[in-house]
Image (cartoon, coloured by chain):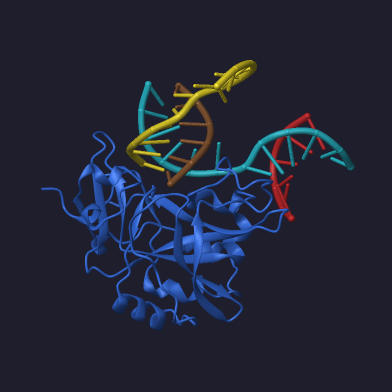
Chain colours: A blue, B cyan, C red, D yellow, E brown
Amino acid sequence: MCGRFAQVVKHNQLKKLIDELNIRNQDEQIELNFNVAPTHPIGAVMYKHEDRFLTFFRWGLIPGWSKEPSTQYSMINVRSESILEKKTFKNALLRRRCLIPATGFYEWRKPDKQPFFIHAKDDELLLMAGITEYWNGSDGSYIQSAAIITTNANDFMKPIHERMPVILPPDTWESWLTDSFQDPASLQSFLKPCADDILASYPVRKLVNSVNVNSEECLKPMV
DNA sequence: CCAGACGTTGTT
DNA sequence: GTCTGG
DNA sequence: CCAGACGTTGTT
DNA sequence: GTCTGG
């Protein structure tokens, strides 16, 4: 699955992202976060009509029908296999998708809880598939939230973990961020494990376990 | 029609 | 809100 | 995902 | 063990 990741977007990576995805608001900053945990704000690329924006969402999707923004129905991950069958997520997939740029993500190896950092072999950003939701409180409060779509592990990930985030390849970005693209079967076809040969990984120290630790140390290989 | 649920992962 | 179950 | 809490009444 | 908070 994907319960922790790093969003450390360097200036040149941000410029490239803005250019490649045709993002409109070019002044947006992304806070460096070496240890993104559920409930944290995450930068994500969202679309509205013909425009794309880099905006912030609470990680943990709060359904619009939820009375309170409680943790109970707040989902950090959504299974790709069943997303169209879930009433809470179907409309979000058809109409409120996003791309979540990540430096990489953490997985804890199943038997021994050893944390690993998984990143792009070429050190570019990984773009994870996400869905978003808007929640309005009766007192006028407003929260926009997001979840990461997950899929089966590819062969690269299997030794570490059975699930992984959906990482979208460049040839799907345009459709994913297009409002009018709402064909369920096509969207579903994007939600599969990424190619094995684009990823690299290494073990990291367990200081990443604590959500209170957010430093460059989280990304450093274990000695 | 109304009532009630609405979710994932991992572990056992 | 929207879908399922009764 | 992991870490940390897990509770009430009454009194100060 | 199970739930909440981050």
Q: Position of residue A134 (x, y in %)?
A: 62, 60
Q: Is residue B5 above or below residue A52?
A: above
Q: Is residue A181 above or below residue A69?
A: below
Report the side of A194 relative to E4 (left or right). Answer: left
The residue located at (49%, 53%) in the rendering is A80
The answer to whether residue A29 is visible is yes
- Quick one: B4 or A68, which is closer to the camera? A68
Place residue D7 in its image quadrant. Answer: top right
Q: Is residue A26 above or below residue A6?
A: below
Place residue A125 in its image quadrant. Answer: bottom left
Q: Position of residue A23 (x, y in %)?
A: 47, 80
Q: Position of residue A71 (x, y in %)?
A: 55, 42
Q: Is residue A10 above or below residue A192?
A: below
Report the side of A152 relative to C4 (left or right). Answer: left
Residue at the far left: name it. Answer: A223
The residue located at (61%, 78%) in the rendering is A49
- Quick one: A206 or A17, which is closer to the camera? A206
Report the side of A209 relative to A127 (left or right). Answer: left
